[in-house]
Amino acid sequence: MNLAVSSLLIFLFVPVNAVQTIDETESHIHDHLILVDYKTPKAQFIDKVPVTMVMCEEGFELIMKKSNGMPACVKPSTVAILIERGWGIHVLPDYEDKDNNSDMLKTDKGEFAIKTETVTYFENYTGYLAMPDTDEENLPGVILIHEVWGLNDNMKEMAEELASHGYVALAVNLYGTDAATTIDEGRQLMSSYDPKKGVDNMSGAVDYLQENYGVQKVGSIGWCFGGGQSLELALNNDEMDATVIYYGRLTIDPERLSSISWPVLGIFAGLDTGITPESINEFEKALDDLGIQNEIHIYPNVNHAFANPSGERYAPEETKDAWEKTLAFFEQTLM
């Protein structure tokens, strides 16, 4: 899996002193901006400073705006609000385009030999299908949802890993294009992402597995952006049987969550300033209040994207434990 970036946000309101830049196209929020005596994040970006190297004033944290991919410096206490409301995403380093998952997965292969192919599963969107090379019927299905980078080799490896454990695994491509390898490419893809089309895309993947492989049960799993989309699929498709969220954008709206009637597994990072332990606990309480079976795990000493082997925040022990929990969860809910 690749460098995870939290779901993009739709701007509803920016708290006073929240953003450290001025954008002439957003005059309606100028009263809430901070003026600084050095180059603003936007000015640095215009000067071709890479997003990952934009400097913030001490005490502020860098995030990226969804609508145009511009960097912004905000107070740490504001990060979670902006992410929750859909205004921005985490800014993380570019990932290394190599076989990043091999160390994590080499001891976790299942008993099945696998076969793979590229398939057109929704309109003209192609995904990566991995499944057990067996004559067994009625295998369960899993939809894998990529991070901000798109459908890359690491996501394909995760599909192969699940297939080796007996699942028909389909890694979708919500962008419909080649994967990004830099945060600049990723921000462009995310900025053009259509959430409604994305839900149709994921639901099309569910239909594809049911119609072509006869899967009786189907789950979804996603990391970061994909984690938020895994939840969105659950909120918009009542044919699911299991939902796994790795540090993705959450909702605590009981009306929306009430559409879920199957178990949910959540994997989160205790040091995440965008999806905080407080918001995770609220999410867990909302599920409990609705009687939705759930397992929520917060790893206290790791940060957002800790399960990404290509990133500097990678935490191998916590990642291995989270993956074991994921496999156990799917076995309990789909097998």
Image: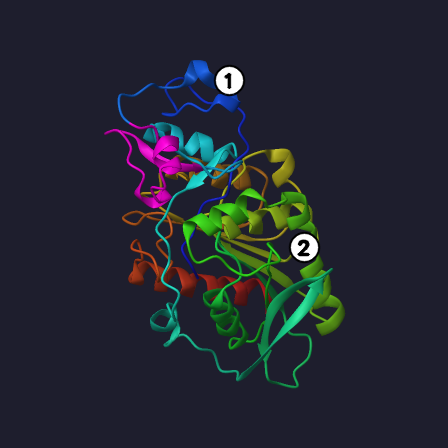
Residue at 51% in and 69% down: 156
Tell me the residue that label 1 is attached to: 27
Q: Quadrant of the C terminus?
A: bottom right
x, y percentage for residue 220? 58, 58
Q: Is residue 154 placed above or below 242 in the rendered structure?
A: below
The magenta segment is 39-64
| Alpha carbon separation for disc pair 1 and 2 | 35 Å
Q: Earlier in the sequence, mark 1 or mark 2?
A: 1
Residue 258 shown left or right of residue 54 in the figure: right
Which is more foreground, mark 1 or mark 2?
A: 1
Residue 99 shown left or right of residue 65 in the figure: left
Residue at 59% in and 39% down: 290
x, y percentage for residue 307? 37, 58
Disc sitting over residue 201 in the figure: 2
Amino acid on which disc 1 is placed: Ser
Q: Is residue 89 placed above or below 226 in the rendered structure?
A: above
Q: Is residue 38 placed above or below 123 in the rendered structure?
A: above
| Front-most of residues 4 and 46 | 46
